[in-house]
Amino acid sequence: MARVQTNTSKTNTSNNKSGKVVQKSTVSKKTGMKASPKREPTKNEIRFFTIGMSVIVLTFLVITAVVLIQYFTAEEEVVPYEDYLHISVSDLKYITQEDDYGVFGDFSYFNGKDEYEDLRAVLNSNDFIYVYFYRSTDLDTDIETAINNIEDVDTLALLFIDLDLASSAELFTTAEIAHLNLDSEKDNMFLTFDINAQTFDLQSRVSDILIEINKL
């Protein structure tokens, strides 16, 4: 009878030697920054600052005073001959141009136009039409006084054109009114249109204009 042998294997266990791990603790040193002491402004700096503020305040007060003075003393802008009837170059053309039958003074263009109501009224109720050409930047005070002294001026066909207006340059280039012989070099002109006689008379000397105005 065979013997069964049992082999017992020994397991060699290696013992690990545990070593102590020495941990070095790193100590961080906080370097504290010393706050620099607050610097006080010097006497010169304080003086310059005071002077600067004084200049600013003084400038503001001066500007305010000037604006207030101008506001309270400014006169209202005066428009010359504001209360009189002004016309344009186009209006003058229709008033004085020659029609297809050789007649001057066909006012039919203004019929039915509400904006020409006042102009139409004086054109249809007068035999003479007067047009005064002036420069608003260079008024002749003698002529102005003479015009202001005209009695019942509202009933006359006395019309005004300001030569200083940009549109007035067309007075000297429009072919339909070339027969009026307007002079671009003159600052004052007074035109008389006799509707019945079909004549035009233009005065450009102040003395002659005053004579014509004093007849009205």
Image: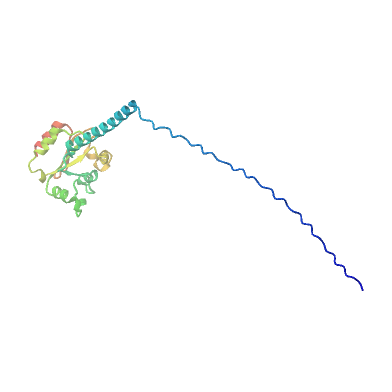
Q: Which residue occupies 16% across, 51% down?
A: 117
Q: Choose between 164 and 69: the one closer to the eye.
A: 69
Q: Which residue occupies 24% across, 43% down?
A: 89
Evaluate whether residue 117 shows in this view.
yes
Please state if 14 lies on the left or on the right of 177 as rendered.
Answer: right
Q: Position of residue 52 (x, y in %)?
A: 31, 30
Q: Choose between 129 and 169: the one closer to the eye.
A: 169
Evaluate whether residue 135 shows in this view.
no
Extreme residue toward the bottom, this view = 1
Q: Choose between 168 and 10: the one closer to the eye.
A: 10
Please state if 125 lies on the left or on the right of 53 as rendered.
Answer: left
Please state if 14 lies on the left or on the right of 62 as rendered.
Answer: right
Q: Position of residue 28 (x, y in %)?
A: 55, 40
Which quadrant holds residue 154? Answer: top left
The quadrant the N terminus occupies is bottom right
Q: How many marks?
A: 0
Q: Is residue 138 above or below residue 105?
A: above
Q: Is residue 159 above or below residue 108?
A: above
Q: Position of residue 164 (x, y in %)?
A: 24, 37
Q: Which residue occupies 23% across, 39% down?
A: 179
Q: Is residue 52 above or below residue 180?
A: above
